[in-house]
Amino acid sequence: MFLKILYALYVSRILVNGINKDLVKQIKGLFNELGYSIVDNDPDIIISVNSINNTIRKYFLKFHNKIIINVVQDGSSVIPLTKEHLGGSLISSFLADSLGANLVLTTSTGVKGLYSVEEFSWLNGFSIHNYDHKIVNSLNKKLVTEGKVSVYLDSYEGNYILYDGYSVVDHKATADLVISRHVDNVEESSDKLYLMPAGIYVGIKYLESTPLDVLVYSLKMTLKSLYILNDRIDYIVVSSSFKDDKKLNQLSKYYYSNIIYISDVDELCSCETLLKELQVKVLLRDVRRAFGVITCLGVK
């Protein structure tokens, strides 16, 4: 039996702490505006404004399996200390850009300016099936030493982005990564890594007068908030009151999406309510992306 593994790539619960209280407040505000949950307990990400030594002493023992990011006290440098290749570098990159800080990466892929296999999956909105550390490590090593990882599209016609070191091949036998929509296509005994759509759900509430280009922009910004740069949404979720809105058909074509209409919800309900009706795990809370447009994002 093949198990769909998101491998905890997408994270949204952030603990921010440190000795520079103004900087801590600024960082909390940055992520809060994007829809992340700022928490005091059970975080996915720890952002520590402190010296590296103090950050290690305070957080490594308890949160060694979480993303830990160190921000120096004056905000001049951002350094992912754990899980750099599992999303730490992406979150740190956004933070560094927002603060105008230097980004310090230490993994072999990061130093060379390459995206690891896990980061390639994250950026494209894919999940990794049958995650195997040996295969992943081997492919990341190949990316660094040979500068190339081959990708085969198997029954996949959606959008995707190729980054430096990744190229499409015509034959599955020569591929390192296989992008597919169907579990049935996964080979039980294989040295390949299989990527499949991660089940990205974006809920949206908007005024009927909202132009199509504003809706396209709002959804793009929602994806970008979670550092998904690929213009593909698996499911767009709206109230059934929008069934006659032709703009949704155009949106679904642009984002290669299925539209899900939710009935029996109050017109004043939150965007998150739309996702929760489908038992979707909400990652980004309700955020106003444009005038009259509110979005949220989750995975299932």
Image: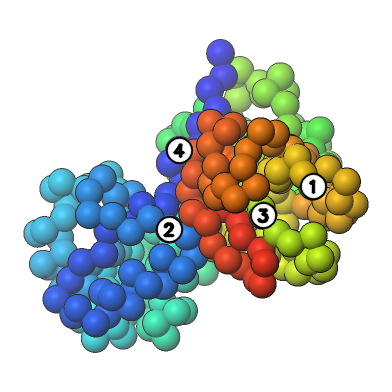
User: Which residue is nearer to you in this view: 291 or 228?
Assistant: 291
Marks 4/3: CA–CA distance: 30 Å
Label 2 environment density (alpha carbons within 10 Å; few <14, some 14–19, many ≥20) = many
Residue at position x 53%, y 22% from top? 3
x and y percentages locating residue 277 in the rendered image: 57, 33
Which residue type carries mark 2? Tyr
Q: Is residue 25 above or below residue 146?
A: below
Q: Position of residue 96 (x, y in %)?
A: 41, 77
Please name the residue that numbered disc 1 is placed on.
242
Determine the CA span between mark 4 and mark 1.
Answer: 34 Å
> Which residue in the structure is indicated by mark 4?
7
Q: Nearer the viewer, residue 125 or 217?
A: 217
Give the residue type at disc 4.
Tyr
Identity of the residue drawn at 65% across and 71% down = 290
CA separation in Å, label 4 and label 2:
19 Å
Q: Which of marks 1 and 3 is nearer the N terminus?
A: 3
Q: Mark 3 points at which residue?
A: 205
Q: Disc 4 vs disc 1: Cβ atoms closer than 8 Å? A: no
